[in-house]
Amino acid sequence: MKKFNTSPISGMQELTPAMQAEFNRLKSGITAAYAQHGFQSIETPTIDRTEILLAKAGGDTEKQIYKVVKTAETANDADQALRFDHTVPLARYTVEHANDLTFPFKVTQIGRNFRGERAQKGRFREFYQCDVDVIGWNTLPVAYDAEVIATLVDALKVLPLPSFVVRVSNRKLLSGLLQALNLNHLSAEIFNIVDHAEKVPPEKTVEALQDLGLGTENVVKITTFMQIHGDYTEVVPKLRDLGCQDATFLEGVEELDIVLKTVQELSATTEVIADMMIVRGLDYYTGTVFETIAPDYREFGSICSGGRYENLANHYTDQALPGVGGSIGLTRLFAAFVDAGLAKASESKPVDVCLLPISSNEYQACAKFATDLRAEGKTVDLVLTEKKLGDKMKYASKVAQFAAVIGETEAASGHYKLRNLKTGAEIEK
Amino acid sequence: MKKFNTSPISGMQELTPAMQAEFNRLKSGITAAYAQHGFQSIETPTIDRTEILLAKAGGDTEKQIYKVVKTAETANDADQALRFDHTVPLARYTVEHANDLTFPFKVTQIGRNFRGERAQKGRFREFYQCDVDVIGWNTLPVAYDAEVIATLVDALKVLPLPSFVVRVSNRKLLSGLLQALNLNHLSAEIFNIVDHAEKVPPEKTVEALQDLGLGTENVVKITTFMQIHGDYTEVVPKLRDLGCQDATFLEGVEELDIVLKTVQELSATTEVIADMMIVRGLDYYTGTVFETIAPDYREFGSICSGGRYENLANHYTDQALPGVGGSIGLTRLFAAFVDAGLAKASESKPVDVCLLPISSNEYQACAKFATDLRAEGKTVDLVLTEKKLGDKMKYASKVAQFAAVIGETEAASGHYKLRNLKTGAEIEK
């Protein structure tokens, strides 16, 4: 019957209507959680100038960016590409519209981004990111790092996860420790080793550190640091006990203390802990960093991550715009939920009530009933096919929760029976 | 201060947060109207195979399509491009997922499409289309044409327009008339002249028809036909009075009669009339066609249009999938609303309540108050800046409707005053 390959391109998520309804329910829940915390919604264009998108990118990003071919009618434009995240367009947006914004600018972007990656399970080339950010004008108190985490905790509660743990650290801690140990010159390598430590056996991490020629004493100091984790009331004293007097390190302790204390005050949550294993690969982050795991589903990887950045838009402006943000990668997560049986095609039918006119003589009565039901907030479908009643009922049972057959009597009386298509129970209307 | 051009690419709509809130309000209203009529939401990928997208396109579409450059990691993929409408991906989707769908398939797609057109006022290269379609399996009664129109009428009522008129016709009428006049061979030219008749003075239309060498009698017959419009109770008799006995023409009269009668029954609307001037340029449509104007804002052009197509996906499958659909081009319309003063930056502040802790000692109390307010459905922002109270209040007055200062007393008592930032009135909480 098919004359063409009609599958979507590899790496694209395309859902059946029932699955889409479930995806939309999660997306709406996240959107509502962000809005309830006072984040304002914006949308940036999918296509932007390549020079903007790549101003500070490099490496994989540059390789994976989808460039767009100019058409005959846009030939004079600058080179263009598809956005690969929300942060770069947000930087451009904040500089462009600064006069129309109120700072601290609490902003959310929920939309699709694009990366031309090799096709593989769990990786998508087009994917929803659900971002929140707070951007300060010149300064931004670290308490906002806590507010971003508290907001994300509320959003994550929408997801069908039995539990999750947000693991928080501060990059100033490891930076300061390395400064104190005179290991600054190996900072990139050591951050990388710590970032990957959970993916390899512990002895591999020790080996990798030793291979850098740090000396046993330094390796012990770093691995001891890495193992610190837990409730902030225990972690902060343990960090102080390390005895490191580097100013950056002490600033990190102070910030982590405020962030974790404020998260508890704002969110009274048991889901947030401190964990020195978290450093985040991106050198973009400068202070607070966090990742989130689902203890029962560690294979999902980080389900929500983010951190503090010193300067959102230093490539575009001299104005200091410090910020903090986090993101939920909903497309990837949804696929993981489906695989794990945590997300199912929505069982709630798309339609509350299906009205089945016996013939076109009853359309007008059906329309009146539909208008009344919609005014009550119900979704209503009219079956206008010229089929037998049995076939109409078969359709109704697939799409709707309730059905009502409308014939001459119902049309004349204005009364009808709503039948629950699951239980068979009837309601008089 | 700027080091870069940070404006979005020409032809892209980028809104301030207050304008975005207004745009989102309209989009949500349309989404809700479609859902209330039982249309199920789907999303198709932004990027698709060029051979799919261009299977039946041609002309302008082919020139304006944005092709995507493959990355090193997607180099083995088929050629790809950005979707330029929702209909082509819907055709692919319906064939691909046919086994998971219930027919008639009532479907809505609300998302961004892309056309690389020359930059000009009122034209966008990235734009939201809000589509509804009903797809039948083998057959689809014309009553569904009426349901699509009734649904769109409900959606259009969400828009800030003082009034609108949906003008309906059926392409079988003019086709049949031309067959009866033996003018079949000039069908494309004549459809084109009728389609453009409202953009030129009437004598130009007559001239253009005469230039085709039709003869005066035929020109009069066509212009007489074109001028028929009004309530369907008057239009259908007028069409019959033309005396055309062509089978296609009579089928068109019959269908128009049912569609308009059913629209009245379903929607009891005064906004829908018959108008033979409407033919729709696209040869894609085969029966019912409609366009919508705002009488007070004719410069907006058609604000919503659509029609019946014989076969959604004949390029991809042998299965007959007749359908009917319509679309609201929200991005273009929103820009027109703003220009005409019909859409303004949302006056409702993004935040219901701003809580202003005097110091970090009150964070915990504020968080408790915020949780309670959010449980009531309120959006709540906590001001965590380390500024003077006056500065915090200035921020609150920009983003919020109500503010409450939370100091030691409020934290201890659990009671505080919500101040209306517009009227100054206070509510005890």
Image (spheres, coloured by chain):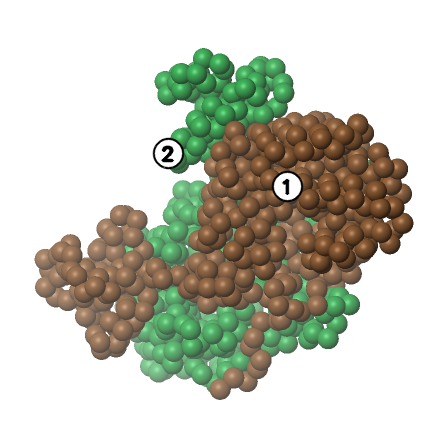
Chain colours: A brown, B green
Residue at which label 1 appears: A229
Q: Is residue B254 visible?
A: yes
Point 59% across, 60% down: residue: A299
B49 vs B299, nearest the viewer: B49
Q: Position of residue A270 (x, y in %)?
A: 51, 39
Local SS, label 1: strand
What kind of residue is marked 1? Answer: His
The answer to whether B272 appears left or right of A170 in the picture is: left
What distance separates the C-alpha of mark 1 from that of mark 2?
36 Å
The answer to whether A368 appears left or right of A113 in the picture is: left
Local SS, label 2: loop
Point 52% across, 42% down: residue: A271
A200 vs A297, nearest the viewer: A200
Point 63% across, 18% down: residue: B387
Check the residue under mark 2 and report the chain it is in.
Answer: B
Point 45% across, 18% down: residue: B411
Kindly report which numbered mark, 1 or 2, lies closer to the viewer in this rendering: 1
B150 vs B196, nearest the viewer: B150
Residue at which label 2 appears: B376
Q: Are marks 1 and 2 on the same chain?
A: no
Q: What is the tally of numbered marks visible in this picture?
A: 2
Q: Position of residue B304 (x, y in %)?
A: 46, 56
Q: Position of residue B131 (x, y in %)?
A: 47, 60
| Residue density around tag 1, few if under 14, some if 14–19, many if 20 or more, within 10 Å | many
Q: Is residue B41 visible?
A: no
A234 vs A146, nearest the viewer: A234
- A258 vs A406: above or below: above
What kind of residue is marked 2? Answer: Glu
Q: Position of residue A71 (x, y in %)?
A: 73, 63
- A189 vs A383: above or below: above
Check the residue under mark 1 and report the chain it is in.
Answer: A
